[in-house]
Image: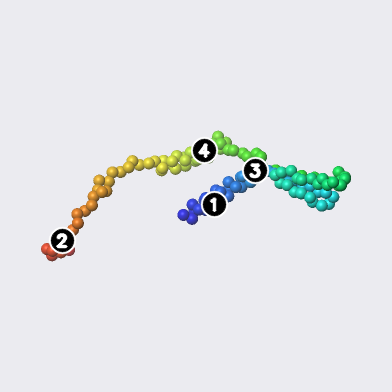
């Protein structure tokens, strides 16, 4: 039972690892002077447009791109050498052959209910098999 739970947890963690390693996003920051005005991860930043005349030189945008892994290698059975292919197919065949379903067996006395004992004849006649 404990190994099944650990296997499930490990499988879920590996799936999240693959998901987040291929995930990429950008972080945009907008500065007015030396003051950070807005930060956005998935949307555009809100720029500072005041009624006052703001020089374009004092505002700057900083964009950081966090790239995920974009090339995942998918191996096929043909990529393996002959010995590894042979061991893998033998293991797979042995595993599948264990899962063969047997025909349903007929149990003739499944619904038989024994008669109710009214009198215990061995005790009544004092017959004891020793």
Q: Which mark is residue 9?
A: 1
Front disc: 2 or 3: 2
Badge 2 is on which residue?
119
The total of numbered circles placed on residues is 4
- Extreme residue in the top direction: 78
36 sits left or right of 113 in the view: right
Question: Which secondary structure lies at badge 2?
Answer: loop
Q: Which x, y percent locates residue 117?
A: 18, 58
Q: Is residue 51 something that shows in the picture?
A: yes
Secondary structure state at the residue bearing disc 3: loop
Q: Judge depth for marks 3 and 4 and give the one in front.
A: 3
First along the sequence among labels 1 and 4? 1
* Residue 97 in the image: above or below residue 13: above
Choose top left, top right, bottom left or bottom right for residue 103.
top left
Say which element carries label 4: helix
Task: Tell me the tag on residue 85.
Answer: 4
Name the residue tied to disc 3.
22
Q: Are marks 2 and 3 in contact (CB under 8 Å)?
A: no
Q: Are marks 1 and 3 in contact (CB under 8 Å)?
A: no
How far, Cα to Cα, is label 2 from label 3? 79 Å
Looking at the image, is mark 1 or mark 3 earlier in the sequence? 1
Q: For the residue carrying disc 3, how many other residues have a C-alpha within 10 Å: few (<14), some (14-19), or many (20+)?
A: some
In this picture, is 59 found above or below 77?
Answer: below
**Whole-Å distance between the Cαs marked 1 and 4?**
29 Å
The span from disc 3 to disc 4 (Cα, nearest Å) is 29 Å
CA distance separating discs 2 and 4: 70 Å
Camera-nearest residue between 60 and 97: 60
Q: Is label 1 in contact with label 4 (beta carbons under 8 Å)?
A: no
Disc 1 to disc 2, C-alpha distance: 60 Å
């Amino acid at each position: 039972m404990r190994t099944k739970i650990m296997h499930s947890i490990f499988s879920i963690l590996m799936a999240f690892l693959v998901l987040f390693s291929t995930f990429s996003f950008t972080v945009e920051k907008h500065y007015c002077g030396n003051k950070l005005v807005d930060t956005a991860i998935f949307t555009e930043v809100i720029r500072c447009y005041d009624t006052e005349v703001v020089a374009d030189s004092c505002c700057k945008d900083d964009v950081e791109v966090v790239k995920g892994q974009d090339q995942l290698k998918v191996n096929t059975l043909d990529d393996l050498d002959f010995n590894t292919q042979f061991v893998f197919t033998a293991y797979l065949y042995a595993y599948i052959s264990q899962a063969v379903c047997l025909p349903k067996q007929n149990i003739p006395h499944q619904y038989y209910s024994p008669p109710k004992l009214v009198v215990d004849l061995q005790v009544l006649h004092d017959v004891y098999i020793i």
